[in-house]
């Protein structure tokens, strides 16, 4: 199961996601950490697509995970394919 917490920068996505992940003992993937690991700070349309696909692939490593990232377009949300948003 993939849970997506999305919203504007500074809106509390990571704060909320961390609390949920800790409470339910599930994996948490934070977009800024993932971007840092991949040295990919491209926020163009192509960069956002790449990040959505990358985040979706990471969720395949666990049965249940929560991801937080801006995910600003319908296309990126479609690429991520969340079970719960």
Image (cartoon, rainbow, N blue to C red):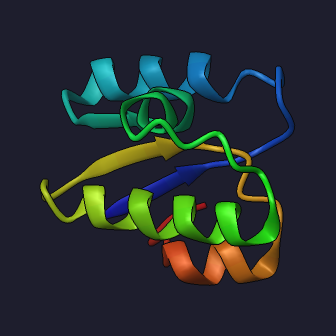
Residue 22 vertical placement versus 85 (above, below): above
Q: Nearer the viewer, residue 36 or 72?
A: 36
Q: Nearer the viewer, residue 52 or 47?
A: 47
In the image: residue 32, left or right of residue 12: left
Q: Nearer the viewer, residue 48 or 21?
A: 48
Q: How many marks?
A: 0
- Residue at the location (73% across, 21% down)? 12
In the image: residue 28, left or right of residue 3: left
In the rendered image, the quadrant that contains the N terminus is: bottom left
Q: Nearer the viewer, residue 13 or 25?
A: 13
**In the image, residue 78 lies at what x, y percent?**
62, 83
In the rendered image, the quadrant that contains the C terminus is: bottom right
- Residue at the location (59% across, 16% down)? 15
**In the image, residue 28 lies at what x, y percent?**
34, 34
- Residue at the location (27% across, 56% down)? 58
Within the image, what quadrant is residue 24 found in?
A: top left
In the image: residue 71, left or right of residue 33: right
Within the image, what quadrant is residue 49 found in?
A: bottom right
Residue 56 vertical placement versus 22 (above, below): below
Within the image, what quadrant is residue 18 found in?
A: top left
């Amino acid at each position: 199961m993939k849970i997506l917490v999305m919203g504007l920068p500074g809106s509390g996505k990571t704060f909320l996601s961390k609390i949920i992940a800790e409470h339910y003992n599930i994996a948490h993937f934070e977009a800024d950490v993932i971007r840092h690991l991949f040295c990919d700070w491209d926020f163009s349309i192509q960069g956002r697509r790449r990040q959505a696909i990358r985040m979706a692939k990471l969720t395949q490593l666990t049965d249940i995970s929560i991801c937080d990232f801006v995910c600003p377009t319908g296309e990126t949300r479609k690429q991520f394919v969340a079970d719960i948003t």
